[in-house]
Image (spheres, helix red, strand yellow):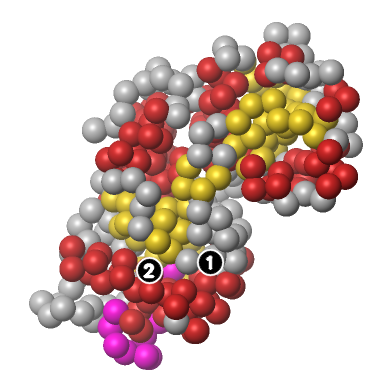
Amino acid sequence: MTFMKSFSRCLLIATLVVVPLVSAVGEAIKSQRPMSALHAGNSEPKEPVRYAATNSRTDPITLGIASINPQKKIAEYQDFVNYLTRKLTSRNSRRGTLHVVPTPFELAQLLIDDKIDFFMDSPYPTHIVNAHAGSRLLARRWKNGVSEYRSVIISRKDSGITRLEDLRGTIIAFEDPDSTSGYFLPRTMLARKGLDLRQMSSFNEAAAPKEIGYLFAGSSEITVIDWVLGKNVSAGAVSDNDLEQLDGKKRSELMVLSASDSLPRYLVSVRKELAPRFGIQLKNILLAMHRDPEGKNILRKMENTTKFDTLPLAHEDLQRRLFDMLPNGSPAK
């Protein structure tokens, strides 16, 4: 655990040195309860994964997920990794392996140690993990039926707030510390305006006149919206898809103060040392999964995934686009 904490701190500093977002990411990691990684399916390999010389694998595919709700993720993803293992090994009895760890930093270490073959996450954590573990983008995932999304900062129309600068001295609600659209992107949007943020302990705590206070709503965009509508906070950050799904009455009471550029909704990445032929096979299985009745049902259980498709941009172009959406700094080598 001491090693992992040291690794996390070093990884964070290397990624965001001289970037105003350093404190944001540090706070995000500190806010999560320490827990051991959970493994589902086969037991954790004691040696790095090794492959047969033939064109198909003999070992199960191994997926990594960063989440503070491991039991929920195991229930959602175990059938998925089992399906991929059967397709890749042609052995119906094999179960895929699922590793659930609390933060993207542990996920990066699993990739470096060859303990997982691939992972899926939203754009910002994906960018951080890939930059440090050397993993590469493979495909795009249509999570909840959506291929792309934007982050929007919203407020009540009757709040008197019409621009981001008006949020000084008030409190904004973010979704959770790992959310791209509900935390990282909106925080960057505020930082670019030269606005300072400080985490509050409750609604009753007053923000300093020149600062914006913030609270986390606990992994729920609905809670963020309810807090804004209920005047608990002056503004909130959600995705444009969350806003579009609101009923007409609630939507009519809200206004968008600012919106980010569009990004892929969810991304699939493979570890650096994965044999190219297996990466190609995995990608082909993913791209065809929604056309297979069994695969389609498994995707639906997996947070209502519609399908996987090819990346909208090349790996390097998409990594650059992610970097350009950060306020300052230099890309990781």
> Which residue of the protein is positioned furthest toward the top in this rendering?
210
Element type at mark 1:
loop
Q: Nearer the viewer, residue 276 or 61?
A: 276
User: Can residue 269 be seen in this snapshot?
Assistant: no
- Which stretch appears magenta? 88-98
> Which residue of the protein is positioned furthest toward the left in this rendering?
53
Residue placed at 43% from the left, 64% from the top?
308
Q: Nearer the viewer, residue 57 or 43?
A: 57
Residue 277: x and y in percent read: 18, 68
Q: Local crowd at mark 1 within 10 Å, few (<14), some, or many (≥20)?
A: many
Label 1 is placed on what type of residue?
Thr
- Residue 224 located left or right of residue 28: right
Q: Local crowd at mark 2 within 10 Å, few (<14), some, or many (≥20)?
A: some
Residue placed at 84% from the left, 18% from the top?
160
Q: How many marks?
A: 2
Residue 214: x and y in percent read: 70, 28
Q: Residue 35's quadrant in the figure?
A: bottom right
Residue 66: mark in rendering: none
Q: Is residue 31 above or below residue 290?
A: above
Q: Which residue is mark 2?
A: 287
Is residue 73 on the magenta stretch?
no
User: Can residue 291 be seen in this snapshot?
Assistant: yes
Where is the C terminus found, in terms of image quarters? top left
Residue 287: x and y in percent read: 37, 68
Q: Is residue 142 above or below residue 241?
A: below
Q: Which residue is mark 1?
A: 306
State the predominant SS element of the stretch in magenta.
Answer: loop
Residue placed at 33% from the left, 34% from the top?
320
Label 2 is placed on what type of residue?
Leu
